[in-house]
Image (cartoon, rainbow, N blue to C red):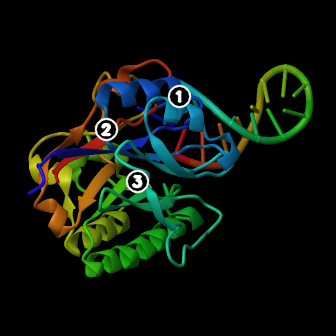
Amino acid sequence: MPKKRRLRIASYNINGINTRLPVLTRWLEEFAPDIVGLQELKCTDEAFPLEAVQAVGYSPIWYGQKSWNGVAILSRVGDPVETRRGLPADPDPNQSRYLEAAVCGILIGNMYAPNGNPWPGPKFDYKLEWMDRLHAHAQNLLESGAPALLIGDYNVIPTDADVYKPERWAKDALASPEAKAKFAALVGQGWTDAIRHLHPDARIYSFWHYWRSSFERDAGIRIDHALLSPNLAKRLKAAGVDRTPRSWEKTSDHAPAWVELEV
DNA sequence: ATGTCTGGCCCGGCCAGA
């Protein structure tokens, strides 16, 4: 019988991979995740910093776009085998928001869901339509029986327990009843929100605005999530948010969310 | 209501996007 070991998988909205490259490489070396989903690369495919990522021991696949969006999957436990680029029937295939790969026998779906502001408006409609497509694809993943993990920046505050002061976000698309309902319906398919599952009453945030000393005041929201299929949920050992890099210079406005699975 | 940061635009502030 093979020896059991822990696999550490993280999701990090890096907010511009080239601008944040010193933060990213330092964090990879210090936190040492086995697999990472990155969001908001904000670079073209040609501008992806392949050598810098390889130099700290990771093998990446990436899906870039000029100026906005962009997602990548990094692994130091074998090359990611890409299974999907964009959602099925993606409402806008020009936006690089979803990348999926098999790594270590696990299917990793990594997303940067639409922000959706201003609400109401066409961007909000796009957010909801994108979430519908995600819902449909997630259902297929569950029905396939594959051990699957849906990680990334969902741009949804699931409940009032996930925001420091709900009234401050009440008019934001991230806290809209429609977005919350779609997230709840997604989880309701049978997924486990790893962080909330292990910490039902904790105030855990993954994003803080740059302004008004939001991080120092812990005026944050939880929008970066890791959803586990039932067969992976049984293997969940730990989950959280690593706040450490959020205090570094020239850092992202997000902090990485992570899970540890026994495999 | 405010507030910060970045890239792109086309060359110095402005604007979109988050």
Disc 1 versus disc 3: distance between alpha carbons? Answer: 23 Å
Q: Which residue is mark 1?
A: A21
Q: Nearer the viewer, residue A159 or A16?
A: A16
Q: Which numbered disc, 2 or 3, marks the residue that appears first in the sequence? A: 2
To the question of a shared chain for discs 1 and 3, the answer is yes
Which dot marks residue A155? 3
| Mark 2 surroundings within 10 Å by alpha-carbon count, few (fewer than 14), some (14 through 19), many (20 or more) | many
* Residue with the mark numbered 2: A33
Q: Quadrant of the C terminus of chain A?
A: bottom left
Above or below, comparing residue B14 to residue A224 in the picture: above
Q: Chain of mark 1?
A: A
> What residue do we see at 56% from left, 65% from top?
A121
Is disc 1 placed on a helix, strand or loop? helix
As measured in the structure, the alpha-carbon distance from the residue carrying label 2 to the one carrying label 1 is 16 Å
Badge 1 or badge 3: first in the primary sequence: 1
Rendered image quadrant of residue A123: bottom right
Using the rendered view, name the quadrant where residue A52 is placed: top right
